[in-house]
Amino acid sequence: MSKLQIKLAKSVIGTNQKQRKNVEALGLRKREQVVIKEDSPQIRGMINKVSHLLEVTEIAE
């Protein structure tokens, strides 16, 4: 499977509580922080909800 590199590009200040919890569930706490996750439909759904705050890059294995 491929992996996704997810970076929190914008701050969560001014977003609603659901979006903040979604970003936190992805493992992101601070702006410019990067996490690597396995590509799955669940992770893609979480990314779609807060895509305006994130930068996502696919990592091929």
Image: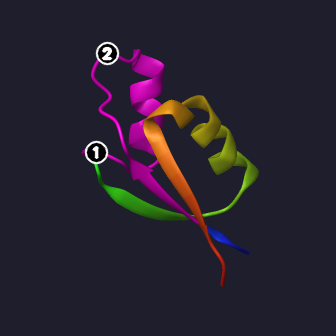
Specify the amino acid type for callout 2. Answer: Gly
Q: Is residue 19 left or right of residue 12?
A: right
**Where is residue 11 shown, x and y percent of the image?**
29, 32
Q: Is residue 15 left or right of residue 54?
A: left
Compared to residue 16, the image places residue 2 above or below, namely below
Q: Residue at x 27, y 22 (%)?
A: 13
Secondary structure under tag 1 reads loop
Secondary structure under tag 2 reads loop
Displayed quadrant of residue 48? top right
Within-10-Å neighbours for mark 1: few <14, some 14–19, many 20+: some
Q: Is residue 23 left or right of residue 39?
A: left
**Where is residue 21 shown, x and y percent of the image?**
42, 30
Specify the amino acid type for callout 1. Answer: Arg
Residue matched to label 1: 29
Q: CA distance from mark 2 to mark 1?
A: 15 Å
Which of the image's four quarters has the N terminus? bottom right
Q: Are marks 2 and 1 in contact (CB under 8 Å)?
A: no
**Where is residue 34 shown, x and y percent of the image?**
37, 59
Displayed quadrant of residue 30? top left
Q: Residue at x 38, y 18 (%)?
A: 15
Residue matched to label 2: 14
Towards the viewer: 20 or 34 = 34
Q: Is residue 24 magenta?
A: yes
Q: Tell me the magenta residue range.
A: 4-30
N-term mark: 2 or 1: 2
Q: Is residue 26 magenta?
A: yes
**Where is residue 51 shown, x and y percent of the image?**
55, 36
Which of the image's four quarters has the C terminus? bottom right
Q: Residue at x 35, y 48 (%)?
A: 28
